[in-house]
Image (cartoon, rainbow, N blue to C red):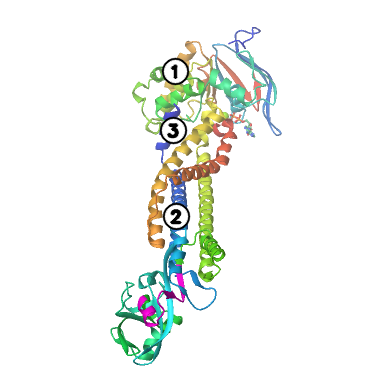
Amino acid sequence: MPEETRENPVAAIEARHLSRRFGSVAALDDASFAIARGEFVALMGASGSGKTTLMNLLTCLDTPSSGELRLNGVDAAGFDEEARREFRARHIGLVFQQFHLIPYLSALENVMLAQHYHSVTDEASARRALEDVGLAHRLDHLPSELSGGEQQRVCIARALVNEPPLLFADEPTGNLDAENEARVLDILRRLHGEGRTIVMVTHNPALGAYAQRIIRLQHGRIVP
Amino acid sequence: MTGILLLRALSVRNQRVWVVFLALMVGAAIVNALISVYFDIDIKMSRELRTFGANVYLGPAHGHSLPEADFDRLAAAAPPGLVAAGSPYLYGTARSELENVALAGVRFSALRALVPYWQVEGAWIGVDFDDRNAMIGRTLAARLNLAVGDSLSLIRDGRKKTLRIKGIIDAGDASDSLLFVGLELAQDWLDKPGTMSHALFSMMNRAGEVERFADELRAAHPDWAVRPIRKVSANEGDVLVKIQGLMGLVSIVILLLSTLCVNTSLTAIVSERQREFALQKALGAANGTIIRQVLLETLAISLAATVVGCLAGFVLAQVLGQTVFSASIGLRAWVLPITFALSLSVALAAAALPLRRIMYIQPASVLKGE
Ligand SMILES: Nc1ncnc2c1ncn2[C@@H]1O[C@H](COP(=O)(O)OP(=O)(O)O)[C@@H](O)[C@H]1O
Ligand SMILES: [Mg+2]
């Protein structure tokens, strides 16, 4: 990665005075924080506190109104749409609250789609990614034939298949029952153990406890 | 992966995709049929309209008659295929056992083509050399009190020629007062061998060919009076042009309608699938990649619709040909590329705006949680 700088070689994410305004609403207001490589951070706060807004900035789905943002040492605040797309494809794994799988593709094909947009498809490694989340027996099932927990694990496999340095999960267990929630969290913890940087949004304090560190948001501001 | 995406996406058959398929299929079928008929119609319509009867008159420029040989000279001078039928006509008066009758000598074999609108009671006479039978106009038959199968005798200088009435003509014109006999018999009886009063022809009138030929003849033969019988000849060309124009118009309207229909469906499809596209963008797909993928799907559907449409169009052309022109419409290979080009243009034109909308889908706002 030639773009990487030497300033802060351990920081995966560095935000300084980061803000995002929608008209007169400051959904994110002057946020400054850093997340080290290999850290597992929970982003917590009440509904409407700006968690998703911040996640969209960190995952390059949105651009800040002001402030600085460095992802893996690269200045992401000034990215145009194409640069954000490119960065997402290369460096970011995304897990959504509502799974978001392509309904007409099998589990395996959904995972391979992420490879397709990243570089080239590799069925063996897509298979392995699904095996890693315990879905070896569900490769050829359509999303509609999978349970909610299984769908979310497909999403995790898809987020991981390109081995991105940054993994983001916005309320990954929000639509799951307790048993599946535990499985997903186990997987996230295992990934953390393997050295991946993980940012997980949740408004559930019990889940926050799984993380190493909690960043709290209130009305768009980071609170101690 | 592109292939897998295409196959899987196409295997999701929702109603809107069928609407796209049907709109393109019907459009291709009708346009294919109309193009086939359009280029066949020049020939077919001309043949059809010619059944309105004779459309060219040949008479003497001076005097009352001209040699029968001029009939053949004209026919020989005509471009091949132009003259469809023709007959010399010789008029005169003859005495019958009852009263004087107006006589017309004709070549019976050409009569059906020259006066197809005649209503005949009994039967037509089919051969030129028939000198035992005659056809008689309705008015004259009534005056002489003759029915089909009756006989009528012509009398001259002590000679007597008995003719059986084979058909009674209802023509709605002067023919209703004439007695029609074979040309040779008339020439003999009227003492005018090798002579005719005038001749009538039925010619194919494509692209004003008749008019041009008539001009040539007038220049080459000052002793001839050659006239297209305008009422039919000019209209014939007009009707052709009008019908072709109408078919062109119908084709354009059909293509516009199917463009509109495909456009509406694709717009709905894009908005129904916007989550899918938003997700692909979130995974790092470029606008161009997604648009190309959807374009590929649209083209695959269009191609299938056009193939089916061309087959249906060929059948439709045959039905049109049979019902309207009583003839089969030839399958011209070059109609297919034209149909494909038009059909795919429709699909592309219809897809342009809906596909542009894909560019404006914002994954952050489409995929946001809660
Ligand atoms: N696209 C947007 N347009 C206008 N306001 C928005 C938009 N996205 C978020 N907001 C506002 O920003 C605030 C934070 O929203 P969000 O980040 O979704 O909160 P959370 O994810 O913590 O529930 C809310 O008041 C929300 O109404
Ligand atoms: Mg949220």
Does residue B121 belong to the magenta stretch? no
Kindly identify which numbered label has been placed on residue B6. 3
- Foreground tag (1 vs 3): 3
Distance from the alpha carbon under mark 3 to that under mark 2 = 40 Å
- Chain of the residue displaying label 2: B
Secondary structure category for the residue under label 2: helix
Chain on which label 3 sits: B
Which percent across, then down, holds residue B307? Answer: 41, 43
Residue type at mark 2: give it.
Answer: Asp
Dot 2 and dot 1 residues touching (CB under 8 Å): no
Q: Describe residue B118's horizontal placement relative to residue A171 as left or right.
A: left
Residue that badge 1 annotates: A187
Q: Is residue A176 visible?
A: no
Q: Residues within 10 Å of mark 3 (few under 14, many from 20)?
A: some
Is the C-beta of the residue carrying label 1 under 8 Å from the nearest atom of ligand 2? no
Q: Residue at x 54, y 70 (%)?
A: B223
Residue B198: percent from left, percent from top: 47, 74
Q: Residue furthest bottom?
A: B98
Mark 1 Cα-neighbour bin, 10 Å: few <14, some 14–19, many ≥20: some
Q: Which residues are magenta?
A: B184-201
| Ligand number 1: quarter of image | top right
Label 1 chain ID: A
Residue tagged by mark 2? B40
Real-space CA distance between mark 1 and mark 3, rounded to the nearest whole angstrom: 33 Å
